[in-house]
Amino acid sequence: MTTRISSQSTFPLEHHFRGARSEMKPLFNQILAKLEDELDFELKVGKTYIGLIHNLVFAALHIQAKKIIVEFTSRKEVSSQRIVKSKKFQKSRWAYYVEVTTPASFDAQLLRWVKESYE
């Protein structure tokens, strides 16, 4: 992994892979590899999330025991059955959450959403 860890991080990366969540490390690495091929970013590691920073945090990964929740933001409403949760947090800004359980579930559609959030 070549992604830099931001000095703004408050926890070590391994904090998110304790116990049963350790099984998600290979999936996390595969997601990161796909993102690194397309985007330039740093990781901001917090207590409950791993943020991806360009100028601001544009996406976050929430590591759980059996899945990784990918959170991305958008300036437009996105409608998809894949989105398990959404929050409107500004006049025209939404946060969306998608569950990833396999490398295949981090597909071209989800990558496109994250790339749009990056811009």
Image (spheres, rainbow, N blue to C red):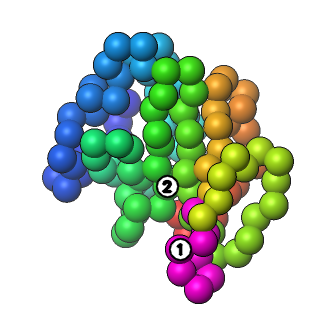
* 92 vs 53, nearest the viewer: 92
Numbered disc 2: secondary structure: strand
Q: Is residue 37 above or below residue 78?
A: above
Question: Residue 13 or 91: which is nearer the viewer?
Answer: 91
Height in image: 62 above or below 76? above
The region drawn magenta spans: 88-95
Residue 28 location (% of width, % of height)? 48, 29
Q: Is residue 18 left or right of residue 83?
A: left
Is label 1 or label 2 in front? Answer: 1
Query: In the image, is residue 65 above or below residue 82?
Result: above
Packing grade of label 1 (10 A; few <14, some 14-19, many >=20) is: few
116 or 102, which is in the foreground? 102
Reply yes or no: does residue 92 show up in magenta.
Answer: yes
Spatial CA distance of label 1 from label 2 is 14 Å
Please name the amino acid that badge 1 sits on: Phe
User: What amino acid type is highlighted by mark number 2?
Assistant: Ala
Q: Look at mark 2 in the image and give the residue it sits on.
A: 59
The answer to whether residue 71 is magenta is no
The first of marks 1 and 2 along the sequence is 2
Specify the quadrant that holds the C terminus: bottom right
Left or right of 95: which side holds 46?
A: left
From what the image shows, is residue 5 above or below residue 105? below
Residue 33 visible? The answer is no
Give the residue at mark 1. Answer: 89
Question: In the image shown, does 58 or 108 lie closer to the viewer?
Answer: 58
The percent coordinates of residue 74 (x first, y second) are 62, 69
Residue at 66% x, 23% y is 102
